[in-house]
Image (cartoon, rainbow, N blue to C red):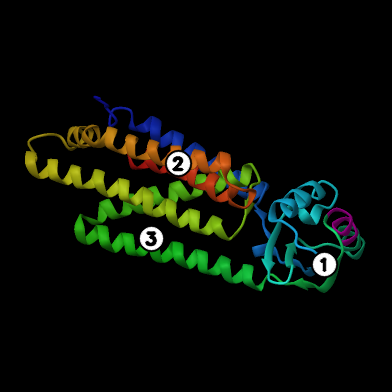
Amino acid sequence: MNLRLMKTKNIYFIFSIVMMLFSFFSMFTKGFNLGIDFTGGNLYQLKFEKPVSKELVGNTLDDMSKTFPSLKSNKVQFSEGNVLFLRTQVADEKEKIGIMNELKTKLGTFETVKAEKIGSVIGDELTKNAFMALLLASLSILIYITIRFEWIYALSSVLSLLHDVIVTLGFVSFFQFEINTPFIAAILTILGYSMNDTIVIFDRIRENDHKYKGKKPFGEVIDESVNKVFWRSLYTSTTTLLALLALLLFSGESLKTFNITLFVGIIFGTYSSI
């Protein structure tokens, strides 16, 4: 591999700027498809006369979501005594009655122990904590890399991380994947993964810069350093993406956004690090 990245760097800058502008456009025009963790909704506590399987409940709710919009985002929790907790998006009285009648027809007789509306207080707290986590992670990275390398390395690494997050958010916004609690974990995982790749490349650049001691143009030092770690970065990312592809194909609907977010984030994280 003999990449000459410094000669074509403007192409990559333009590509990244276009991707970020597209992401901002999507976020401001289409917004996000927020799940019930963020928007609040309805909570039902149902006690069935006979045991019901998780698979049957999941398939039933997926089928019913075509008729009842509030079921497009739902969470199910099973408890002892044939008790099921169902959280959905906000539904009016007519839709709630329809959901209960349909569930009785398809799953069997049950008693509605509780049916109440839940607010978005948890969602507001999650959003606040997510921004705080992102801010603290960026500041920590900035301080750490400034101490280990130089401030210019730290600044470029944080800009690279922001690039990864913005492009990933734009992708999720454009395709309207549901944003839920695991999505926050995916974003923070992307930060760690991308930073790991960046540190390896920075370390090789610093090592070669000290080796040549100014006898070689810095642009050539960068090209040489990136070429030496290129295949390592590519192989590491490819093996991770293969594992995520398996999760995408075989995991449940509840982890769909998490897996897709990680998949896209790792691709752009690897690109931006290099």
Q: Callout 3: few (<14), some (14-19), or many (20+) C-alpha neighbours within 10 Å? A: many
Amino acid found under the numbered disc labelled 2: Ala
Distance, label 2 to label 1, CA atoms, is 41 Å
In this figure, which residue is indicated by the disc labeled 1? 49
- Which quadrant holds the C terminus? top left
Picture disc at residue 138:
3
Q: Residue at x 38, y 47 (%)?
A: 160
- Magenta-span inclusion, residue 162: no
Decide: is 116 above or below 162: below
Q: Callout 2: few (<14), some (14-19), or many (20+) C-alpha neighbours within 10 Å? A: few
Element at label 2: helix
Left or right? Give the position of 69 relative to 121: right
Image x and y of residue 121, in percent: 65, 73
Q: Earlier in the sequence, mark 2 or mark 3?
A: 3
- Relative to the observer, which residue lies in front, 246 or 4? 246
Q: Residue at x 62, y 52 (%)?
A: 254
Image x and y of residue 24, in percent: 57, 47
In this figure, which residue is indicated by the disc labeled 2? 243
Label 1 close to label 3 by CB (< 8 Å)? no
Amino acid found under the numbered disc labelled 3: Ser
